[in-house]
Image (cartoon, rainbow, N blue to C red):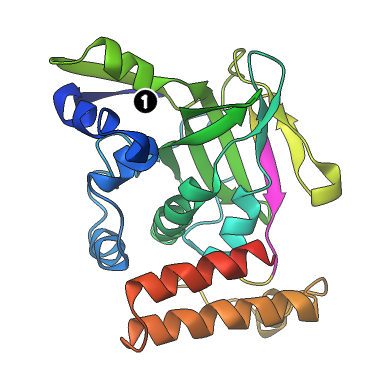
């Protein structure tokens, strides 16, 4: 399957948000947004893409690549908190030479939910394609930029392969205002590196560069393949459940996120309270 996919964007609808004034920074998100109920419904029947606006989404796709590659370790149940921490470590070098985050804090709020759901239902021959748009600050100016690529869980780590980063899709939308725009996104390929992408390794944070367009981030206790029909040996199961590297601090942080989610699921706190508290916990990581 080609790594390029096409999206027909209603430019007039996006322009309404973009021209609304100073509050347009999250205009794309405000059109649809992503809720736990929407994620749950898609995970129950993951056909097509899970959108949170007219551009940004995740979807399952056959991974391609050499046939002798080992399958991905999927489905994989990965906690949103740990996934958010991993996504926050990903960086790329812009065309101007500045190192920028691949995902902004605003993007991570939604990408962590969507990606956790997708990895939890993907099989060993599938990658999770993603498109995400958010504010990036470069040389004192904030621009709304888009990244596209594919993610998968293998070798005990989250693998993120990027086909394009720092694309100003909003500029394309503005120039095509009043019409419809077909947007082609490049999700990258296992077969060869995308030459226009320069990701940045962060060894001190455990982020390694597999290729110029491919980063790998080890995931700890929560990052484990979901149960399959074949039961693992008891010793192996214990090793997965309690990895030697799991620290008390990580476990305590996971427990805080799990408690917050349970309170929200039971309706004991509102959506606004849930999002506010989760943001506070993410900043404390």
Q: Is residue 45 above or below residue 179?
A: below
Whole-percent x, y for residue 247 in the image: 80, 76
Residue 217 among those drawn in magenta = yes
Residue 23: quadrant of the picture: top left
Q: Is residue 237 above or below residue 45?
A: below
Whole-percent x, y for residue 112 in the image: 48, 56
Whole-percent x, y for residue 37 in the image: 26, 68
Q: Is residue 136 above or below residue 254?
A: above
Front-lying residue, 92 or 276? 276
> The magenta stretch spans which residues?
215-220
Residue most toward the front?
21
Residue at screen point 68% across, 74% down: 240
Residue at screen point 70% across, 80% down: 251
Q: Is residue 181 above or below residue 7?
A: above
The residue beneath circle 1 is: 1
Q: Residues within 10 Å of mark 1 (few under 14, many from 20)?
A: few
- Quadrant of the rendering where the N terminus is positioned: top left
Front-lying residue, 259 or 222? 259
Residue at screen point 62% across, 13% down: 195
Residue 6 in sight here? yes
Left or right relative to 33: residue 86: right
């Amino acid at each position: 399957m080609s790594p390029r996919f096409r999206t027909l964007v209603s430019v007039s609808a996006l322009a309404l948000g973009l021209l609304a004034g100073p509050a347009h920074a999250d205009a794309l998100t405000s059109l649809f947004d992503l809720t736990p109920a929407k994620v749950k419904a898609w995970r129950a029947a993951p056909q097509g893409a899970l959108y949170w606006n007219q551009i940004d989404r995740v979807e399952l796709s056959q991974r391609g690549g050499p046939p002798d590659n080992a399958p991905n370790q999927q489905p994989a149940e990965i906690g949103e908190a740990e996934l958010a921490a991993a996504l926050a470590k990903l960086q790329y070098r812009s065309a101007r030479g500045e190192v920028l985050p691949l995902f902004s804090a605003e993007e991570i709020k939604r990408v962590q939910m969507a990606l956790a759901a997708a990895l939890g239902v993907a099989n060993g021959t599938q990658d999770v394609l993603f498109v995400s748009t958010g504010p990036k600050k470069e040389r004192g100016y904030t621009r709304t930029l888009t990244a596209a690529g594919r993610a998968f869980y293998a070798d005990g780590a989250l693998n993120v392969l990027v086909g394009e980063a720092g694309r100003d899709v909003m500029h394309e939308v503005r120039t095509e205002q009043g019409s419809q725009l077909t947007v082609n996104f490049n999700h990258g390929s296992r077969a060869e590196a995308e030459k226009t992408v320069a990701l940045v390794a962060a060894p001190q944070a455990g982020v390694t560069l597999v290729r110029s367009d491919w980063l790998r981030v080890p995931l700890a206790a929560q990052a484990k393949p979901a149960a399959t029909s074949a039961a693992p040996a008891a010793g192996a199961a214990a090793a997965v459940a309690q990895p030697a590297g799991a620290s008390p601090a990580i476990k305590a942080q996971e427990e805080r996120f799990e408690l917050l989610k349970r309170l929200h699921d039971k309706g004991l706190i509102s959506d606004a309270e849930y999002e506010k508290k989760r943001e506070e916990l993410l900043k404390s990581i």
